[in-house]
Image (spheres, rainbow, N blue to C red):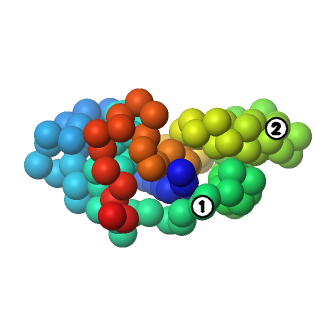
């Protein structure tokens, strides 16, 4: 069992377009926007994967690094708080250890949106029929 890391940073307006976020849409595999269902990240090309981890702590550390790298731009001052971020990372370790997905999403200044996800793979708990994108 392992987790794949995915990150998407783009226009918040792109989240409102359901089509490219659904697997049957022709743009789905080329669109880097976060899918409507987290397990569907595994249907995207392997090149979208930002990292793969077998250790929950290492996966959660990557998750935290991505959050901290963008926290200064979070619209919500509450979400920028280091104690809050540390708590999210600690919960991410527990979730990853339980073979769960970990997802975070934040609006950033300039009407942008950041999505950071750790997707369980090998097999995915909710979608065991979806194969690992790395083979």
Q: Is residue 54 left or right of residue 25?
A: right
Residue located at (74% from left, 53% from top):
57
Q: Is residue 90 left or right of residue 124?
A: right
Q: Is label 2 in a helix, a strand or a loop?
A: helix
Residue 104, percent across and down? 59, 40
Residue nearer the viewer, 83 or 130 = 130
Q: Residue furthest right?
A: 83
Q: Where the C terminus falls, by quadrant? A: bottom left
N-term mark: 2 or 1: 1
Residue 61 visible within the image: yes
Q: Residue furthest bottom?
A: 47
Quarter where residue 35 is shown:
top left
Residue nearer the viewer, 8 or 129 = 129
The answer to whether marks 2 and 1 mark residues whose Cβ atoms lie closer than 8 Å is no
Residue 134, percent across and down? 37, 65
Q: Residue furthest left?
A: 26
Crowding at dot 1, Cα within 10 Å, few <14 / some 14-19 / many 20+, comes out as some
Residue located at (41% from left, 30% from top):
126
Crowding at dot 2, Cα within 10 Å, few <14 / some 14-19 / many 20+, comes out as few
Residue located at (60% from left, 61% from top):
53
What number is the disc on residue 4? Answer: none
Above or below, comparing residue 8 to residue 102 in the picture:
below
What number is the disc on residue 53? Answer: 1
Distance (Cα) linking label 2 and label 1: 20 Å
Residue located at (78% from left, 33% from top):
78
Residue nearer the viewer, 134 or 106 = 134
Residue 106, percent across and down? 59, 40
Q: Which residue is mark 2?
A: 87
**Image depth: mark 2 or mark 1 in front:** 1
């Amino acid at each position: 069992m392992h987790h794949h890391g995915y990150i998407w940073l783009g226009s918040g307006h792109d989240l409102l377009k359901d089509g490219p976020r659904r697997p049957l849409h022709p743009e789905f595999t080329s669109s880097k926007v976060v899918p409507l269902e987290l397990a569907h990240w595994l249907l995207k090309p392997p090149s979208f994967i930002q990292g793969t981890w077998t250790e929950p702590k290492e996966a959660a550390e990557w998750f935290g690094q991505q959050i901290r790298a963008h926290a200064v731009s979070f619209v919500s001052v509450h979400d920028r708080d280091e104690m809050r971020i540390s708590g999210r990372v600690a919960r991410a370790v527990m979730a990853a250890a339980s073979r769960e997905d970990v997802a975070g999403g934040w609006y950033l200044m300039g009407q942008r949106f950041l999505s950071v996800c750790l997707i369980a793979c090998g097999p995915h708990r909710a979608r065991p029929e979806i194969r690992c994108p790395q083979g």
